[in-house]
Amino acid sequence: AENYKLILLGVNETSDWLIDRSGKNRKLSDFPNAVGAILSTLLVMEPLKLLHMFAMAKFPVAVWWEQPVQALPPRMLHKPNWTFFNSTFGEFPGTEMGKFLAAKGFNQVAYISPYHNSSWSIDRLAGLRQVGLNVVDYTDKEFASPWDYKQIARSKVPKLSVEAFARDLLKRKIISLIDNDKNFQDLPIVCVNDEVASVIIEMNDEGTIRTSGQIFAFDNSAESYLQRIPSYEFNTQALVDHMFYYLENSDAYTGAQKIQEILGQVVEK
């Protein structure tokens, strides 16, 4: 939209090289006319390595920080031509969901997460409580993400059966979390993500569990539209717009908060 010529690079975390789309190794000096860089730490296992590759850049650097905010070294926050952007981590997604629920008249909800060994699950629960909701938590700290279940599945079954096996593992975990708690059956339910919400609806339809409460979730994925789940949308479009605006107007961020938190909203279906 802004008529930039975009050069897309990946990072080989084993060799610490940047790589272009043809697989060729590149370095920052290969792009002397670059006016800025946008870095995404999504699925980067060692994000600080990626940041260090751009540490000497003279142009503005906008970082989409897809990691816990606490993991960001203070020295990186003080770099004069760098600004960090966050839309998914921290307590504010949970806080925004909590405000939405409170506005609808809810004062007590259940929160269910089989991924509570992650900062994002913990923060979403904290955000819900921050607005004064009485939250009954059904959480488990064994795993940190859906990938953990899939890793187990890969070691147990053939490739074509991985998704189904992982979903079955998730169902078993949810059953253990609820443990026939009758309180859960009547409460509105906030799920840590759309996937968990969809599984709960599926299990309720199967008769595996019973719930009559309205279900809410995070991600606003295609699954939430199929199941008509009100879900918190992380505003990726605004995030990208803000990052490109920063590249053009980095002086406007002088002295500003170095982590820009981009709010989303709950989308009702």
Image (spheres, rainbow, N blue to C red):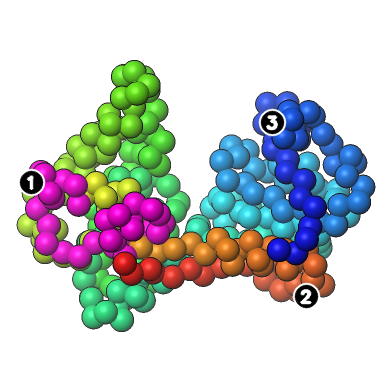
- Residue shown at 34%/51% (left/top)? 223
Which residue is disc 2 drawn over?
252
Circle 1 — which element?
Answer: loop
Q: Is residue 34 left or right of residue 122?
A: right
Circle 2 — which element?
Answer: helix
- Residue shown at 78%/28% (left/top)? 24
Mark 1 vs mark 3: which is more N-terminal?
3
Q: Residues within 10 Å of mark 3 (few under 14, many from 20)?
A: some
Mark 3 vs mark 2: which is more N-terminal?
3
What type is the residue that disc 3 sits on? Asn
What type is the residue that disc 1 sits on? Gly
Q: Residues within 10 Å of mark 1 (few under 14, many from 20)?
A: few
Circle 3 — which element?
Answer: strand
Q: Residues within 10 Å of mark 2 (few under 14, many from 20)?
A: few
Give me the C-alpha separation between circle 1 and circle 2: 56 Å
Q: Quadrant of residue 27?
A: top right
Q: Is residue 28 left or right of residue 44?
A: right
Which residue is disc 1 drawn over?
207
Image quadrant containing the C terminus: bottom left
Which stretch appears magenta?
201-230
Q: Is residue 210 left or right of residue 2?
A: left
Label 1–label 2 contact, CB within 8 A: no
- Residue shown at 62%/67% (left/top)? 260
- Residue shown at 35%/63% (left/top)? 231
Which residue is disc 3 drawn over?
12
Give me the C-alpha separation between circle 3 and circle 2: 33 Å
Q: Is residue 179 visible?
A: no
